[in-house]
Image (spheres, grey):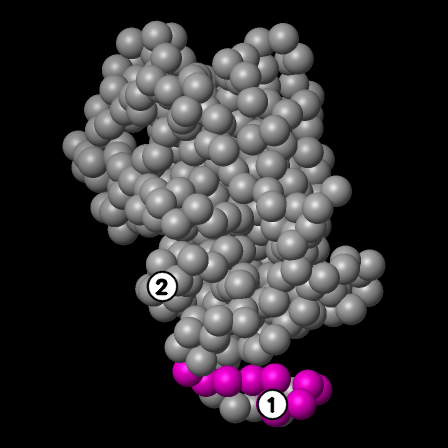
Amino acid sequence: MSRQRLNIGLFGFGVVGQGLYDVLQKSPAQDVKIIKICVRRKINRSLPDNMFCYNPDEILENEDINTIVELIDNADDAYHIVKKALQYGKNVVSANKKMLAENLSELVKLAKEMNVSLLYEASACGSIPVIRNLEEYYDNDLLLSVTGILNGSSNYILSKIFDHNQNYQEALLEAQKLGFAESDPTFDVDGFDSLYKLIILTMHSFGVIVKPDEVLNYGISNISEFDINYAREKGYKIKLVGQVERLQNKKITLFVLPRFVTKDKYIYSVEDEFNGVVIKGLAYDKQFMFGKGAGGHPTGSAVLSDITALGHFYRYEYKKATYFGGFQYFKEGAIEVYLRYRNPDVLQNFEFSSVSEEYHGPEYHYKIGFMPLDKLIAIKEKLRTLDIFLAATGKTLNY
């Protein structure tokens, strides 16, 4: 089988970059060599100084480098690096889910025009090979939904809450001390990380590119002891879940919300920093993928998988968009939600089409019922400022 030699220019040498370097040293992968590493500033490193550079063009304009591996945390900088690399006719491997989700249409088109590969397995679920499976194994018209825990940081926090009886602040502090959550945890706990991953998975599931600002994402930062106790009394756990689901007439709906999860669901037992993805199909029912969703070595192994695939001239064919196109993002359906609030005045922000359960207490109140998804999307930025907690029950309604 023919292979191509990959001379790599690596951008970023943080946790994932060093993780990739480590797994490359342990891997039997042939014809792969890191030529140069671009970083923002000089710090003490175990590698010799001549391995590093500080000007991106030193790598991008190097004709001996045919593959760019982008592993930096700044989405804007990553976009300029990836775009320029593609324009230079270089293959690209990226793990930057925000950059990809916001620019997927442009970058996919550019990669096709330049006849190069753009791979990003590590952007979705760390070590879980979900993108390539959606591309290659589930490359038919039988897919019904992809549902999962896509963020390890929020899942770690919720695991500590429900399995170890910690409160939210205690669990968050522990996650930060262990490096699972940033000092500013908004990206993870408010569902943005899961949102960007879901955008990418939706493209490979149904061939539809959806803009992130058109999708509902709401996280766990407003969770209270009342919500936790409610879930426990019902025998539920709360998980932050991303879902894309096929509806009737080739419509799809997608959102990221905390969800009440029962013991009979696969994701109920996904704990700590692990991710879990359930793929449901018409003929094969449900299949479950599980693995570490974060960390240098797990994510580095996913990057290495893309590099190895590149060695065999692999590229995404975007089969769902090419062969099974025609799916439309549908925002006008309804989802059943639990809305916990203190001040009844907050209800003026919400429009229930039906209510199945209601409670009024001395401090907290809640309603459970169906809400139009488009109404929630319209106020999604405001949701995080309100004294409420919103969670999905798992039921959707297609109009």
Q: Is residue 205 above or below residue 129?
A: above
- Residue at coordinates 51% horizontally, 21% vertically from top-left? 145
Inspect the image, locate mark 2, and give the three-letter code of the amino acid beneath it.
Answer: Lys
Determine which quarter of the picture holds residue 140: top right
Element type at mark 2: helix
Extreme residue toward the front, this view: 2
Mark 1 or mark 2: name the one nearer the start of the chain: 1
Cβ atoms under marks 1 and 2 closer than 8 Å: no
What is the number of the mark on residue 125? none
- Residue at coordinates 17% horizontally, 32% vertically from top-left? 348
The answer to whether residue 155 shows anywhere in this view is: no
**Which residue is tagged 2?**
84
Q: Specify whether 30 is left or right of 286.
A: right
In the rendered image, residue 53 lying in the magenta stretch gets the answer yes
Q: Give the range drawn in magenta.
A: 46-56
Quarter that holds the C terminus: top left
**Residue 386 percent across, percent down from the top left:** 27, 46
What is the number of the mark on residue 50? 1
Q: Specify whether 138 is left or right of 223.
A: right
